[in-house]
Image: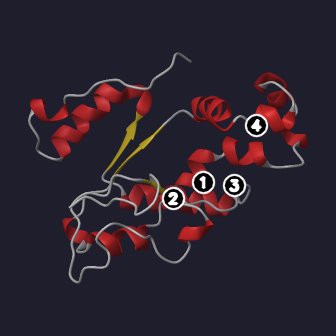
Amino acid sequence: NIVVPRIGHQLQGPEYEDVWPVVGDDYANITYNIFCVHSKFDYQKISNLMGDERRSTYITMIRNPVDIFVSAWGYYKPSVSYKMTIDEYARNITNDPKKEGQRILHRLLSDLGVENYFDQDEVDNKIKEVEKRFHLVMILEHFEESLILMKNLLCWEPEDIKNLKLNSRVV
């Protein structure tokens, strides 16, 4: 069984503070085998969904924060509300009254569950948690190498990691 959100394609945002509504959560004793959903990392919520934590392998993928920012700028289009280009915004980022760009700038930290990006202790603690909880942190810019590491970790065969590159853009 794969964890699938009841609505949309991700499990994050204020509406998901208490519980994650997923397909099948209304059945007693349901177990899930794969959690492959964009969500804010919350170990307790994920381990509650996945069951016995000794049987779960935690893998995530991170990406260069600059590439995340450029991609998010294109996707969310804050240039409309800011009335400036990404280069103009980058030169004035510290003067951002809306903080919309700050959320985009710190997307990696946000996805890992950091609430206050400027609290060094919180960031350091999250790094320690990532090191403790994840069996593998894949790096998008080293995708092929990361797939090999995942294949080895999961005792898969080379045929198990075939992939197609879709929806990509040149940076």
**The image quarter in which residue 52 lies:** bottom left
- Tell me which numbered mark, 3 or 1, is placed earlier along the sequence: 1
**10 Å crowding of disc 4: few (<14), some (14-19), many (20+):** some
**Residue identifier under label 3:** 117
Residue drawn at point x = 28 percent, y = 69 percent = 50
Element type at mark 2: loop
Image coordinates of residue 25 in percent, x first then y, are: 32, 75
How much space separates mark 2 and mark 1, taking CA atoms? Answer: 7 Å
The answer to whether the residues at label 3 and label 4 have Cβ atoms under 8 Å apart is no
> Pointer 2 and pointer 1: residues touching (CB < 8 Å)?
yes
Comparing marks 3 and 1, which lies closer to the viewer? 1
| Labels 3 and 2 touching (C-beta < 8 A) | no
**Residue hosting label 1:** 110
Locate the N terminus by quadrant: bottom left
Badge 4 or badge 2: first in the primary sequence: 2
Residue type highlighted by circle 4: Pro
- Labelled pair 4, 1 in contact (Cβ < 8 Å): no
Q: Earlier in the sequence, mark 2 or mark 1?
A: 2
Q: Viewer-proximal residue, 49 or 2?
A: 2
- Mark 2 Cα within 10 Å, few/some/many (few <14, many 20+)? some
Q: How many marks?
A: 4
Q: Is residue 77 positioned above or below 19 on the image?
A: above
Residue at mark 4 to residue at mark 2: CA–CA distance: 21 Å
Q: Earlier in the sequence, mark 3 or mark 4?
A: 4
Looking at numbered disc 3 in the image, what kind of residue is underneath it? Answer: Tyr
133 displayed left or right of 157: right
Q: Is residue 48 above or below residue 160?
A: below
At which x and y percent is residue 10?
47, 54
Task: Report, in whole angstroms, how far the alpha carbon at label 3 lies from the one at label 2.
Answer: 14 Å
Residue with the mark numbered 2: 40
